[in-house]
Amino acid sequence: MAYFLGLVLALAAFWLGMSGHTEPLLLILGAVSVALSCILAYRLDIIDREGAPYVRSFGLLAYYPWLFWEIIKANWVVIKACVKADLDIAPALVKVKTCCRSDLAKVTFANSITLTPGTITVEIDGDKLLVHGLYEQLSQPEAFAEMDRRSALAVDGKEAKA
């Protein structure tokens, strides 16, 4: 029930914020559209923890600045590789085991790897990710442990045991 009420409030706030209209007719039409959307979501049985982003807002707000800093550091490594006269990259494919429990946490972890320059997640298979990295020494599974832990904490809400 809390997820349903949260969805109603989130959709109403989103509608009001995006439209900015406060005329009675438009408010009624907005309320009808929010109600229909919530009824459809309920009938489709898609109101759950993963469909409720407001539940994990605080965790993600703490995770994104850390991820942004990691992206900046990885950009520096890739920029140095690009401006060197000799191309000294050593590409590698590695399997990384994740401690994330939910599919959303796994996807967040995989997308975080892909957002970080020089690495890309090729495949997710159960609790293992296949990652391609520009440098073999920087692409070892241990290099992703902190990102894995933080993404599990941000999305799942508590640290998972590896």
Image (tube, rainbow, N blue to C red):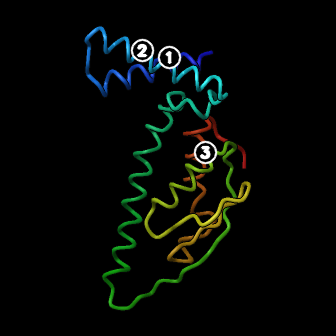
Mark count: 3
Occupied quadrant, residue 73: bottom left
Q: Nearer the viewer, residue 132 or 66?
A: 132
Q: Residue at x 72, y 54 (%)?
A: 127
Occupied quadrant, residue 96: bottom right
Q: Would you name the residue on which mark 2 appears?
A: 31
Quarter of the picture containing the N terminus is top right
Give residue 114's position: percent from left, percent from top: 50, 61
Q: Is residue 65 above or below residue 113?
A: above
Q: Is residue 145 above or below residue 131?
A: above
Give residue 157's position: percent from left, percent from top: 60, 34
Q: Give the structural element (helix, strand or loop) at label 1.
A: helix
Determine which of the numbered discs, if any, sits on residue 35 in the image.
Answer: 1
Q: Residue at x 68, y 67 (%)?
A: 95
The amino acid type, in three-letter code, at marker 3 is: Ala
Real-space CA distance between mark 2 and mark 1, rounded to the nearest whole angstrom: 6 Å
Do tag 3 and tag 2 residues touch (Cβ < 8 Å)? no
